[in-house]
Amino acid sequence: MHNPELLSEEKVFKDPVHRYVHVRERLIWDLINASEFQRLRRIKQLGTSYLTFHGGEHSRFNHSLGVYEIMRRILETFEGRIQLSREEKLLCLCAALLHDVGHGPFSHSFEKVFRFHHEDWTRAIITGETEINRILRRMGDGFPQKVAEVIAKTYENKLIVSLISSQIDADRMDYLLRDAYYTGVNYGNFDIERILRLMRPHEDGIVIKFSGMHAVEDYIMSRYQMYWQVYFHPVTRSAEVVLRKVFQRAKDLFQAGYSFRVEPVQLLPFLREEITLADYLALDESVVFYYLHQWKAEQDPILKDLSSRFLDRKLFKYVECTPKDFRLIADLQKLFLEAGIDPSYYLEVDSTSDLPYDFYRPGEDEERIPIMLLMPSGEIVELSRKSEIVESISGKRRFDYKLYFPLEKVLALPEGLRQAICERLGVVKDADGSCQDHPSD
């Protein structure tokens, strides 16, 4: 392992959430300036949420810097409490900085259609033939693999893993505060200063001093509210549905031999599902927006309409539904086909679920790293055993289902079809069977 070089002068980024991001190591500075990391400036942190919360335009670049800064502060807090080598500290900082480097444009919509996972691309960027890999290998040929293992939660030191991936980690703390700041909501705010001050290293993970329990309760409730009020907002989900349908239509047309007005050169590897690392790194949201603008003028009426809907925010409306209402979907699909509206692109059930907090139970396959409290007696106790608030939501997964469709197309149908569709949508939505427009926020 090479001895890490310090910068001749500390570099400082102004940050609206943490005030400043401090960089002292040459390794970190060079990683930030690597082309693969700079690409994150061109990828939004919140995907389609900017169509719901107009301030939510921030990038994965500034989130990644924020996670790095929280990790740096955690390591400062741990000074004198635990012996981490210089390499291990840099391993923590690098994993924090690079944890999202594999994200693509509108990650979740894009991944569902083209069937890949950003985690795989994160590992490929860190361990493959990239500028980031060359920089990391200054610490030794095995160092990039160690960084990838920390992010993948397979690294042998569980304390280091828990700092970047647990139920109270640097990643979650930054995105809650940052997303709340940029979307203009108060839900995600919590007392990070107190949590960091009362965080302690302990064997294979971190613990929080018992006196900080209420700050942790606030953090967990902030996370709960952010998921349901921001991340799972129905309008954001409508935008994701429309965007998924855009990608799906483009893919279906390509596979059918359709001749695009402008050949989607940079998307061809994805349409063929033969993607190299270079192909992936060449893709960002500016490329996607370019093709959306081109498709807005396509001959294919579905691709043209869906692209216009996304760009101009003419999104699908929605009605509430539950699994017992799914029997109605088949009826609606038949009625949509009869009306000349392809249900493959214009009728979609979208489901979300969240587990605000949980802990591992014997016999379960999925490992969950719980939040542990350090009691005044020195005993280590799982959070929900001491917090009535957390105990009340622990292990309780909440589900939400919505049916998305183009209301204006339905309302423009002949009366018989319109009434038949509205009656079925009304059964899902309202007791009075009405089928009317409603606000999108």
Image (cartoon, rainbow, N blue to C red):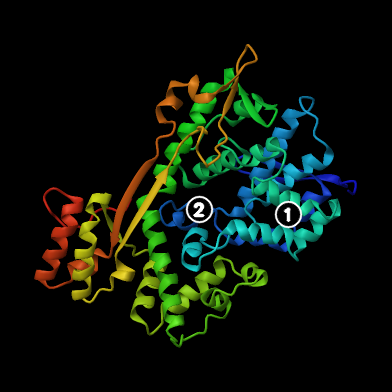
**Which residue is drawn at the image coordinates 73% and 49% (left, top)?**
147
Residue 181 is marked as none
Specify few, some or many for label 2: CA neighbours under 10 Å numbering under 14, 14-19, or 20 or more.
many
Q: Nearer the viewer, residue 410 or 205?
A: 205
Q: Is residue 187 visible?
A: no
- Tell me residue 102's x, y (percent): 62, 58
* Quarter occupied by residue 48: bottom left
Q: Is residue 247 visible?
A: yes
Specify few, some or many for label 1: CA neighbours under 10 Å numbering under 14, 14-19, or 20 or more.
many
- Tell me residue 139's x, y (percent): 85, 51
* Quarter occupied by residue 440: bottom left
**Which residue is drawn at the image coordinates 74% and 29% (left, top)?**
78
Residue 32 is marked as 1
Q: Nearer the viewer, residue 228 or 182?
A: 228
**Which residue is drawn at the image coordinates 64% and 45% (left, top)?**
153
User: What residue would you read off at disc 2?
Assistant: 46
Q: Amino acid at mark 1?
A: Ile
Callout 2 secondary element: loop
- Tell me residue 76's x, y (percent): 75, 32
Q: Is residue 391 left or right of residue 319?
A: right
Q: How many marks?
A: 2
Q: Amino acid at mark 2?
A: Leu
Q: Is residue 190 left or right of residue 22?
A: left
| Residue lying farthest to the top in this orientation | 377
**Which residue is drawn at the image coordinates 70% and 43% (left, top)?**
21
Callout 1 secondary element: helix
**Residue 387, above or below 436:** above
- Tell me residue 169's x, y (percent): 61, 37
Give the mark nearest the N terminus, 2 or 1: 1
